[in-house]
Image (tube, grey):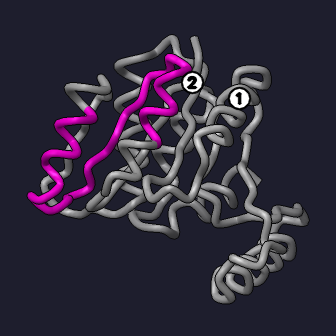
Amino acid sequence: MKPVIIIPTLNPDEKLINLVQKLKKSNLLIVIINDGSKKECTDIFETLKLRLQCDILTHTKNMGKGVAIKTGIRYVSQRYPESCGYVTADADGQHAAEDILKVAEALEKNPDSLILGSRNFSEKNIPFKSRWGNRITSFVFLISTSKRCPDTQTGLRGIPKEFTQICLSVPGDRFEYEMNMLLEFA
């Protein structure tokens, strides 16, 4: 079975609905983790659940992106055990639907490999802080692991099903979880 898309979110807007509408054209299952969003976002989650048939998991308070990803992986591994893995994506419109689908396709063809979406940091619209922050973490990653990773902070990842227990045991509740995951896999 195809991978399941996991999207953790806090206080989403219409960008998430637009993204899901595009992804649904490929008949992929999508799990959204509401990580303690404001009540004003209730309509967005209802639209995602009722109109777009997404599975919605809810944390009653903000637990952090790492916890939300683990919640999604745990749920998908139990609810859809025939899936070949998970594709994590951000809810803020940072990832194009086409790129998410490319990662899903790559994971399906390479079910034993971690697949990372990578942003192009040479583009002019990339904020200075993001560009330099990623350069620094990529350099630290290279020194720590002897492995090159051009985008250590990407939230767009294809994770094989066989890595489920590793993902659930990696420490980190917030954004540090994603770097910890990369270090564990390296």
Q: Which residues are magenta?
A: 19-48
Amino acid residing under circle 2: Pro
**Quadrant assignment for the C terminus:** bottom right
Q: Residues within 10 Å of mark 2 (few under 14, many from 20)?
A: many
Residue 75 badge = none
Q: Residues within 10 Å of mark 1 (few under 14, many from 20)?
A: many
Q: Which mark sits nearer the N-terminus, 1 or 2? A: 2
Q: x%, y% of residue 180?
A: 59, 62
Tell me which residue sits at (78%, 80%) in the image: 135
Q: Whole-Å distance between the Cαs marked 1 and 2?
A: 7 Å
Q: Is residue 78 left or right of residue 4?
A: left
Q: x%, y% of residue 120?
A: 79, 64
Q: x%, y% of residue 50?
A: 20, 26
Callouts 1 and 2 close, C-beta under 8 Å: yes
Front-most of residues 170 and 136: 136
Indicate yes or no whether the magenta region holds residue 108.
no
Residue 107 badge = 1
Amino acid residing under circle 1: Leu
Q: Is residue 63 left or right of residue 5?
A: left
Tell me which residue sits at (90%, 66%) in the image: 146
Tell me which residue sits at (82%, 62%) in the image: 149
Q: Quadrant of residue 106?
A: top right
Q: Quadrant of residue 144?
A: bottom right
**Quadrant assignment for the N terminus:** top right
Q: Is residue 45 above or below residue 29?
A: below
Considering the numbered disc 1 on the image, is that residue within a helix, a strand or a loop?
Answer: helix
The residue at which mark 2 appears reads as: 3
Q: Is residue 186 above or below residue 134?
A: above
Considering the numbered disc 2 on the image, is that residue within a helix, a strand or a loop?
Answer: loop
Q: How many marks?
A: 2
Front-most of residues 96 and 57: 96
